[in-house]
Image: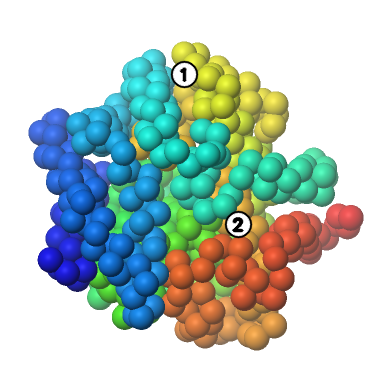
Amino acid sequence: MNYNELLDQLNSLSLAITTMNYDALTIAPRSGAKYRNKAMSILYGEYFNIMTSEGTYKILQDNKNSENDIIRLSVKDQLKGLDKIRNIPQKEFVAFENLKADAQQTWEEAKNSKDFSIFESDLQKLVETQKKMLTYRNDGLIPYESCLNDYEEGLRMEHVESFFSTLEKDLVPHIDTIIAAQGQKPAFLTEFVSYQQQDEITQMICEHLGYNESFGYVGHAEHPFSSTFSINDSRITTHYYENDFTSNIFSIIHEIGHSTYNHQVNPEFEGYPLADNMSMSMHESQSRFLENMIGRSKAFWTPLYPKLQNIIPDVLGNVSLDEFILGINYVDRSPIRIEADEVTYPLHIMVRYEIEKKLFNENLSTKNLNFDFANEMKRLLHITPESDSEGVLQDVHWSDASFGYFPTYALGTAYAAQFMHAMEKDLDVTTLLIEGNMKPIFAWLKENIHQYSGMFTAQEMLQRVSGEPFNPNYYVKYLVDKYSDLLGIKLA
């Protein structure tokens, strides 16, 4: 068997698993979960067997110095991944995949019931099993740094904490000033908007952003996500709340940011691991860029707002564009991370970072974790969640053992601000947005970022695109300037 034949086998199994997982989180009946999860775990086991076989290792070793850049870089990435799993007993690997599939269902039940006790046992097993899986790696990293490294190669606790320290020093002190300057929260944000109307809004946004059925699909899930099947098959999900219609708007924009990144990869990468091996911090930089730097700007909504008013005239008919912009940028100490404004959002990530660090490095028990989580929210956000669903259960990530993922949201957002600074040197972004012309913006992203997929690390990409290493001051300046302009105040 040669390298391309090996890829055909692995890709076929991966496509089947991805399809089943997307269905499980969207349209599949809950009562079929146990049977479905067992079947998925068997497929994971088959993938594991092929990937960890001596034959595969030999093929990868034979191709690691290939003259073909795509093959060489793909093999390099596969060997790194193989080092993480090759020493795990197959039965333990399959059992862990089955646990994650079952835990997804348990988490949904617990969240809907607002009862952490339903999920607590599975979460404890997930943490314990993840810790055991890490011991098979022998990567020389302490447990939580090994988790961080999975989502951005080279990321360490000192990097995360240095970034958070900058935010605590230069951004957090402005929060109370911003809140005090805003006045009352606009009532339209919680007005009733039907699912049918939200479908129309979703279609409007997708059309404006060029997300269409030629490569995309919008489903519905408990927690919005993006799932990549291939370069030309990148699906997303959203979730409708009848009294929070902007949640859907920004979920859709965020997930399209992810999906567009995968879709704009160099088509020559199709079928190779290089097509979808970006770090999650890079991925989040693209989703948060589109969601926030673009999607919450007045320029973006200038051509779209009349269309939105026509869809929900009872809600927005008497709301001006400026009032709408103030509303969608309203700063509030909200309990829900994915609904959080740009200024308080990093604090939500700090909460999860502190909890994860204690779970993995300090052996914090999941028993009473709902109270530990609530206490962190009170300490950092100065709010207490009203229920477990607003606290420890609000995010899906722990149900599939994505420990170490959360910091990439905050870092990715800061990377996005640095990329925006670079883009504005080449494009008149504001004018393009006012004209409703997204094509040059997506073309710039493709030319400078998307086409390369994961050929470069996040830090290498920042250097290539902006000409300097990661600089969180661009992020702080972006927020300070934005809210100074929005509210007519001086933040210094």
Q: Please give the residue where the numbered disc 2 appears in the rendered image.
A: 413
Q: Amino acid at mark 1?
A: Thr
Q: Name the spot of residue 103 as percent of width and height, x first.
A: 30, 29
Residue at 44%, 77% in the rendered image: 451
Residue at 59%, 68% in the rendered image: 460
Residue 460 relative to residue 469: left or right: left
> Which quadrant of the figure contains the C terminus?
bottom right
- Residue 98, compared with residue 167, is above or below; it is above
Total count of labels: 2
Q: Is residue 472 visible?
A: yes
Q: Name the spot of residue 327 as percent of width and height, x first.
A: 62, 54
Q: Please give the residue where the numbered disc 1 appears in the rendered image.
A: 366
Observer-side mark, 1 or 2, equals 1
Q: Name the spot of residue 92 as percent of width and height, x first.
A: 25, 30
Residue 344 relative to residue 263: left or right: right
Q: Amino acid at mark 2?
A: Thr
Secondary-structure class at tag 2: helix
Cα–Cα span, label 1 and label 2: 29 Å
Residue at 66%, 64% in the rendered image: 417
